[in-house]
Amino acid sequence: MNKIGRQRQWQWVEDYCIWLEDGSGPQEAAEAMRTQAAYFKLRAEQKLAERLQAGLRRGQTIGHALKGELKPDLLELFIIGQQYNCLTPLLNDYRDIVVELQRLRWAFYRQLAYPISVLFTVLLAYAYAATHYLPRLLSYSQSGSSEAVVEWVINIGNIIASGWWWLLGLLTCLVMAWRWLAHNWVGRQRLQAERYGLFAQFRAINALWLTRLVAVLMHHHVALDTIFAVLIRVASPYAGWHLKRMQQRLAQGRVSLATVLDTGLLLPRQLFRISHRQQFNGQREALVSVAQRSYVDIQRSIAYQQRVWIVLCYLLITALILMLLSAVGSTMMAVMTSI
């Protein structure tokens, strides 16, 4: 498989589309791409063009020739864009969706970077105080015992100093387990957990991904059953589970788009908007409206969750600092009374 990054794949496909839209045939466009890549010593792009040329010579379609070379979602959109003669606008629309979703994902973590770094610094201070500073001060005290707050600080600091590696490993395992559950856990229990706010952010982003993509593909006159079939092939297990249920509802002859999409992924108010607006503006316009509103809702949700987590971080930092200052003060007082 050709090792080429997603962004470079995207640029290669866009450049290839320009040749096709300029009137070149698939083989001629591939040869032009190979020649230019060889001239500028872009080995990955050159191999990609050569792979396409080899597949075309064997009578394969462009999509089949590029299978395994492009990311699955990009390849599926490439095939759909060719079939419906909308390759360039479809890729541009999809790129906007990807950028939008990436912005939403990173927006939550950027604001947490500073308080987490402060918390990490305070924990390092605990480790230093427990292993060096407080034991040295206590050695000057004639009292054989120390206050409870001092013991607490020393115990916490020793845990951090001696077991930082397993704490880091435990945190990494928890994050990986959370990510795996978010992408793979499906079923009735997942729906019940989401009602209590668990994985709410992941659910909202997947709902936005679905509504935006379905609206874009419908805009390019792709049938709804084809849309579900394409998205199932590129979706995560979680989104794929919802898409398969939507596909089953569509096969059962459900007419209302809101009824088809009512699998638990979209919120009731989103389904209400789709049902209401579909009666007056059509399916695509209803989805576009819901997607736009969902984007605003997710931004507000992210801002609210950021505030909650930032407040919790600073409360924890304040409590740890006060405990550390109290322990240092108590130890200094014990030393002063011993002199």
Image: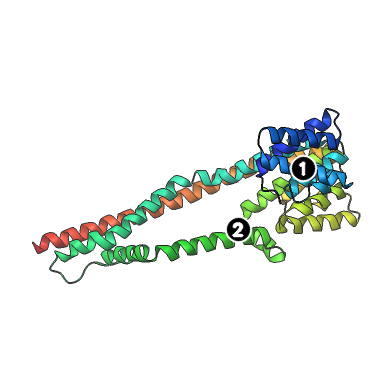
- The kind of residue on which mark 1 rests is Glu
Crowd class of label 1 (few under 14; some 14 to 19; many from 20; radius 10 Å) = some
Q: State the image coordinates of residue 251 (x, y, percent, origin top left).
A: 89, 56
Q: Which residue is mark 1?
A: 50
For image coordinates 85% across by 58% down, the residue present is 248
Q: Image quarter for residue 289?
A: top right
Tell which circle, 1 or 2, labels the residue nearer the N-terminal end: 1
Task: Kindly give the residue lying farthest to the bottom in the view shown.
Answer: 144
| Residue 83 numbered tag | none
Q: State the image coordinates of residue 5 (x, y, percent, origin top left).
A: 65, 44
Q: State the image coordinates of residue 44 (x, y, percent, origin top left).
A: 68, 43
Crowd class of label 2 (few under 14; some 14 to 19; many from 20; radius 10 Å) = some
Could one spot residue 277 in this view of the protein?
A: no
Q: How is the image coloured?
A: rainbow
For image coordinates 72% across by 59% down, the residue present is 237
Could one spot residue 306 in this view of the protein?
A: yes
Q: State the image coordinates of residue 167 (x, y, percent, origin top left).
A: 44, 63
| Residue 179 numbered tag | 2
Q: Nearer the viewer, residue 35 or 67?
A: 35
- The kind of residue on which mark 2 rests is Arg
Relative horizontal placement of residue 26, taking residue 149 as reference (left or right): right
Q: Nearer the viewer, residue 132 or 295?
A: 132
